[in-house]
Image (cartoon, helix red, strand yellow):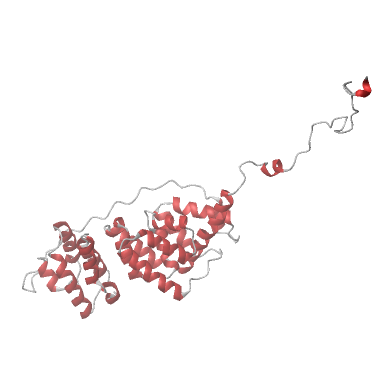
């Protein structure tokens, strides 16, 4: 566990929560606990830092959060003794066994979806053909219509396809974007976050907003992987950018696992599909409404017959009112 970068700025986050009026202490305690129990063992500095951070939060959270943290740490073998005693899991005598709490039940698996025949875009993912704008648009729509498991499968399959990926974002531009995106996420400024994302990845505002506003979070993970955002920074972005992500431990860790396993090539191929899909969208927007518009625009030959007598050639008829007619 890389404790220093993960826990850095903890006091600043607490100050931000007090200023904004949002109580994020229960979420922070859950996240810190889950990150701690992922590793099999910890150094003395990591244990000391975990004790300092969680000791201040245990007495300030609700009973449900405290019970959930107590259940996770009761079955973890490397829990610091100070935290065990603070949670009432072990008495002052170290030789007494710690009571075990009931494990938190895992959420039920999603219902199985019926298998659909592969589309032309799915077949193209496994072929050697280059990506055309229409195919990119179909891949774009297919990805956003898919469920969480299908999106993960699509992203991982992109790493093995011969499709051409977008060029890497320059390190200087990516570092500046990562800092801006993180600050916008801390302030929950979705508008500026979307604007910076679109400018960094060279995407139109429509696609950038679709990535940020997606309820699943997989498009956001792919976009952040395209600029090589560090994993701890991505976890903090998830925690603060959208409340539905930050208050759900399951969503937080599902997207964190996806982000850690997602390759850079998969993200850059998906970025190429997003960019190419805008070309197909623009073509469809300015396409003629009727199939024969161009033919009807040509000048049609006149069907009106020409008069037999041209203007100015008819003889003059005298009316008899002048002197010569008398």
Indicate the position of residue 214 as horizontal and vertical percent values. 39, 54
31 or 279, which is in the foreground? 279
Q: Does residue 97 appear in the picture of this structure?
A: no
Q: Relative to 89, say whether 4 is above or below.
A: below
Q: Residue furthest left?
A: 92
Indicate the position of residue 82 as horizontal and vertical percent values. 12, 73
Image quadrant occupied by the N terminus: bottom left
Q: Relative to 202, say whether 121 is above or below.
A: above
Q: Residue furthest bottom?
A: 44
In this picture, residue 21 sits left or right of residue 273: left
* Residue at point 61%, 47% (across, down): 287
In this picture, residue 88 sits left or right of residue 230: left
Q: Residue furthest top?
A: 326
* Residue at point 20%, 80% (across, down): 44
Residue 93 figure quarter: bottom left
Image quadrant occupied by the C terminus: top right
Indicate the position of residue 254 as horizontal and vertical percent values. 34, 60
119 or 201, which is in the foreground? 201
194 or 312, which is in the foreground? 312
Q: How many marks?
A: 0
Q: Does residue 84 appear in the picture of this structure?
A: yes
In this picture, residue 317 sits left or right of residue 253: right
* Residue at point 37%, 69% (across, down): 180
2 or 288, which is in the foreground? 288
Residue 16 figure quarter: bottom left
In this picture, residue 294 sits left or right of residue 282: right
């Amino acid at each position: 566990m890389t404790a220093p970068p993960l826990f850095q700025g903890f006091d600043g986050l607490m100050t931000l929560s007090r200023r904004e009026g949002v109580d994020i202490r229960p979420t922070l305690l859950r996240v810190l606990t889950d990150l701690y129990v992922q590793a099999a063992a910890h150094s003395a500095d990591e244990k000391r830092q975990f004790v300092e951070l969680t000791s201040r939060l245990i007495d300030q959270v609700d009973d449900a959060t405290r019970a959930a943290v107590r259940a996770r740490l009761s079955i973890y073998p490397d829990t610091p003794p100070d935290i065990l005693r603070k949670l009432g899991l072990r008495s002052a005598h170290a030789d007494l066994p710690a009571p075990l709490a009931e494990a938190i039940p895992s959420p039920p698996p999603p219902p199985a979806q019926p298998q659909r025949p592969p589309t032309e875009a799915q077949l193209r993912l496994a072929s050697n053909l280059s990506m055309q704008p229409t195919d990119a648009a179909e891949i774009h729509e297919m990805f956003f219509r898919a469920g969480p498991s299908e999106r993960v499968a699509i992203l991982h399959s992109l790493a093995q396809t011969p499709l051409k990926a977008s060029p890497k974002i320059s390190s200087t531009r990516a570092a500046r974007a990562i800092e801006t995106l993180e600050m916008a996420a801390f302030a929950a400024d979705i508008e500026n976050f979307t604007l910076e994302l679109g400018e960094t990845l060279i995407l139109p505002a429509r696609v950038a907003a679709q990535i940020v506003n997606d309820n699943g979070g997989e498009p956001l993970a792919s976009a952040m992987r395209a600029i090589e955002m560090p994993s701890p920074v991505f976890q903090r972005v998830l925690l603060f950018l959208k409340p539905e992500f930050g208050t759900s431990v399951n969503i937080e860790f599902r997207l964190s696992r996806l982000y850690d396993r997602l390759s850079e090539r998969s993200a850059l191929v998906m970025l190429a599909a997003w960019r190419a899909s805008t070309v197909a969208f623009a073509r469809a927007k300015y396409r003629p409404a009727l199939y024969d518009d161009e033919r009807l625009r040509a000048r049609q030959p006149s069907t009106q017959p020409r008069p037999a007598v041209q203007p100015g050639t008819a003889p003059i008829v005298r009316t008899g009112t002048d002197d010569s007619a008398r």
